[in-house]
Image (cartoon, rainbow, N blue to C red):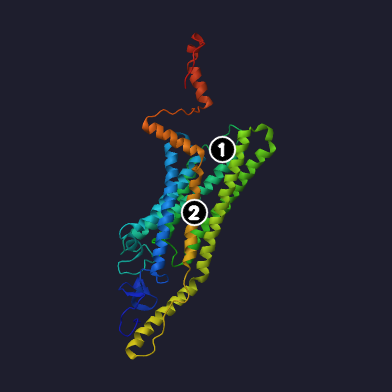
Amino acid sequence: IKFNSSGQCEVPLVRTDNPKSWYEDVEGCGIQCQNPLFTEAEHQDMHSYIAAFGAVTGLCTLFTLATFVADWRNSNRYPAVILFYVNACFFVGSIGWLAQFMDGARQEIVCRADGTMRLGEPTSNETLSCVIIFVIVYYALMAGVVWFVVLTYAWHTSFKALGTTYQPLSGKTSYFHLLTWSLPFVLTVAILAVAQVDGDSVSGICFVGYKNYRYRAGFVLAPIGLVLIVGGYFLIRGVMTLFSIKSNHPGLLSEKAASKINETMLRLGIFGFLAFGFVLITFSCHFYDFFNQAEWERSFRDYVLCQANVTIGLPTKKPVPDCEIKNRPSLLVEKINLFAMFGTGIAMSTWVWTKATLLIWRRTWCRLTGQSDDEPKRIKKSKMIAKAFSKRHELLQNPGQELSF
């Protein structure tokens, strides 16, 4: 059917010849690209919010990556290096969120060429900007949460091996990479195969299931929920292992070792609390969307019909109804949901907010500027023994000789 007697499309609908863009049974008219459930002021408010938190997350994770690179010889060890990959994922994800702030990028990402919303991407007659942003944001998010599970598992197994010469992670690192990079790839390809990538002018990105929330539940909430269960199990077991070591062997631990265990337990506890809290917030916000989506769509349809009656009533001088969308999503809930996601990235970066990081950057600065570093060097016992053994003949000839390392 035509939208009205004049064949014109009234706001919030726009004229389009693409049948895939038509709004329900309204022939020739599709929903405008800018989400009509939110006002222009709300759009601007959300974009400023994303710019602020996206930039903070990007800077925090970038600092963490730079810290690892500055001391890569010592940092490239498991399980510590897993934090490097987790932060790398959240850094790439933040770049995907901030890409919309390039000149004209947001319009290109979330809007079709005919001025309607991007729904059911990828399509053959549209640019790949929407799909590219989706892949960056979604793949990085899923890879980051899978790395989180690997991190908790690595902590758990490493704590169990404390005080022994056993290396529980040797030979497993290649499997870590296979799991963390391939699983998100499979999920990403599956979403593209069913064409369930939608653009959203409020968030400024393309993501899975903005229109069909069942796909959001299956491809976002289900993996995150599974990660929470598995990662939480290993995290709790790791803390219990540390507590057992401290309680059962108090006489074998030095004061420094006991203090280190207490600090680690505290940090793991805070980290676990934040992780559970952010996931709980994410689930709550999504359930809010799921339970209210039908009502929002009904209110929007009533608004569209009201606008049609206004157009018809004006020439006939009939009473003109006052049109408004009675039920709309809460911008605050959307902000809280994004805060949980960006907050997770910031929380992951806090593991380098330590005194050791200050020492790393001090050594790096001295190395770059050519200054001498008076900090005592820590050398592994194996290297000391090997070097002393290599100079055993010199020591026999001159027992008073001092070895320098």
Q: Answer few, some or many: residues within 10 Å of disc 1's Cα (few below 14, many 20 plus, some between 14 and 19).
A: some
Number of marks in the rendered image: 2
Q: Residue at x 37, y 33 (%)?
A: 368
Q: What residue type is labelled 1?
A: Pro
Tell me: 401 left or right of 367.
Answer: right
Q: Tell me, yes or no, if residue 258 can be seen here.
A: yes
Against 147, residue 224 (above or below) is below
Q: Which structural element holds mark 1?
A: loop
Q: Where is residue 90 in the image (x, y as percent from the top left)?
A: 44, 50
Q: Closer to the camera, 166 or 33?
A: 33
Against 130, residue 315 (above or below) is below
Q: Residue at x 43, y 58 (%)?
A: 190
Tell me: 275 left or right of 57.
Answer: right
Q: Closer to the camera, 185 or 78?
A: 78
Q: Are marks 1 and 2 in contact (CB under 8 Å)?
A: no
Q: Tell me, yes or no, if residue 196 can be seen here.
A: no
Q: Closer to the camera, 110 or 259?
A: 259
Q: Which residue is drawn at 53% across and 61% down?
A: 283
Q: Position of residue 202 (x, y in %)?
A: 41, 64
Q: Answer few, some or many: residues within 10 Å of disc 2's Cα (few below 14, many 20 plus, some between 14 and 19).
A: many
Q: Which amino acid does label 2 sit on?
A: Gly
Against 183, residue 218 (above or below) is below
Q: Which structural element holds mark 2?
A: helix
* Mark 1 vs mark 2: in front: 2
Q: Name the residue under label 1.
A: 168
Q: Position of residue 298 (x, y in %)?
A: 46, 77
Q: Mark 2 points at which residue?
A: 343
Give how far apart the Cα atoms at labels 1 and 2 are.
31 Å
In which quarter of the view is residue 133 placed?
bottom left
In which quarter of the view is residue 18 placed?
bottom left
Quarter the N terminus occupies: bottom left
Q: Which of marks 1 and 2 is nearer the N terminus?
A: 1
